Image (cartoon, rainbow, N blue to C red):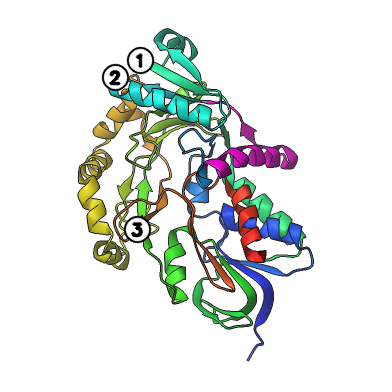
Amino acid sequence: MTKPAHFDLVIAGAGILGAACAWQYVQRYPGKSVLVVDKEGQPASHQTGRNSGVVHAGVYYPADSLKARYCRQGLQDTLAFCRQEDIAWLQCGKLIVATDETELARLQQLAVRSQENGLSPQWLETAELSRREPAIRGTAAIFVEQTAITDYPAITRRMLSKAVSGGAELWFNSELKGISEQPDQVTLRLSDGRQVKAQQFLNCTGLMADRVISMQGLESDFRILPFRGEYYQLPPKYNQLVNHLIYPVPDPALPFLGVHLTRMIDGTVTVGPNAVLALAREGYSWADINLKDCWDNLTYQGFWPLAKRYWRSGLNELHQSLRQSEYLKLVQKYCPQISVEDLLPYRHGVRAQAVSDKGELLHDFRFVETQRTLHVGNAPSPAATSAIPIARAVVDKLMG
């Protein structure tokens, strides 16, 4: 029998967070051995490769939260990495647009929150909004100039390349099937039958994070529920439709930012996302159905309190998903010239939303750890923006 390989650190998950952790680790400890495993054939296959590419500035989050601190630092770190590595980026700024009196009051609160997070939002009345964005209609808006766009899969690939240059190994098509922790090491069993020994193990599997925690026999007070975000692309005639990113004023009771217009780094414009409960952990369409995933959702003790609290929002999202004309109304509130015919197919994403066993949406980071393992159980949006500072903190935890 082949002798198991041995590494100082094994990381499960080759999305942007796993890549950032591998890169940070080899930078800090160049003599140590690192392995990154992923069940897919390439990096950034799920959340990292299916988001809108926005580098957030930290508008929405309580200033004293980890999410806010990591986002503020992540904006600087991400753009610095892009400049250093010659990866495409554009600091085009974001407009958050209010279209009625209720949204106007929330917009004023967001302006204050932005200032608390060290930003300098510009308040725009209707005339100035129309001058800057002729296609956009609203009663007022705030402009956050620090917000940017980039190519997160490209960043992930570059971080992994730098980690490999530092001595790390990458094993794709290698799904984690078992974890056993002993006093002196961790034994990992992979889908191809190989075993790997590690001094430490790091779980960065995103949508599967809670299942990897359970695989080790550990308990947690949350579960990952998958919410699909459906995107559309506008036709090329609309590539110059907007000069900035255009966001609605979000509902503060929900963790989602609403359907927005995004300038993509390739020059196109996308619309989305909404948020509907997916029928599979990696369910990118209504045709993607996994009965085990559905059963796990329905039998989770936190699901029904969540459903009771948000059933109206859930029905609205479902209705808008099934009827493009209803989805379109969310966009036409602030951009009336877009029609149903303009909503062209585009890739969808799935968000790993952690939900407590009491039915609460978890908005900040959650870790589960033992002597030799560290599980990133919840890395909420904007985790892609914040990947570098999160990785520094994770490496601190590993070596603390």
Q: Amino acid at mark 2?
A: Glu
Q: Amino acid at mark 3?
A: Ser
Q: Amino acid at mark 1?
A: Thr
Q: How busy is the neighbourhood of tag 2: few (under 14 within 10 Å), some, or many (20 plus)?
A: few
**Residue 72 among those drawn in magenta:** yes
Tag 1 near tag 2, CB within 8 Å: yes
What residue appears at the point 29 percent right and 34 percent down from the top-left corner?
327
Label 1 or label 2, whichever comes before in sequence order: 2
Q: Which label number is shown at residue 356?
A: 3
Above-or-below relation of 395 to 361: below
Secondary element under disc 1, as helix, strand or loop, is loop
Q: Position of residue 149 (x, y in %)?
A: 56, 34
Q: Which label number is shown at residue 139?
A: 1
Label 2 or label 3, whichever comes before in sequence order: 2
Using the numbered discs, state the Cα–Cα distance from disc 1 to disc 2 in whole angstroms.
Answer: 8 Å
Tag 1 near tag 3, CB within 8 Å: no
Q: Position of residue 67 (x, y in %)?
A: 51, 45
Q: How busy is the neighbourhood of tag 1: few (under 14 within 10 Å), some, or many (20 plus)?
A: some
Q: Which label number is shown at residue 304?
A: none
**Residue 91 among those drawn in magenta:** yes
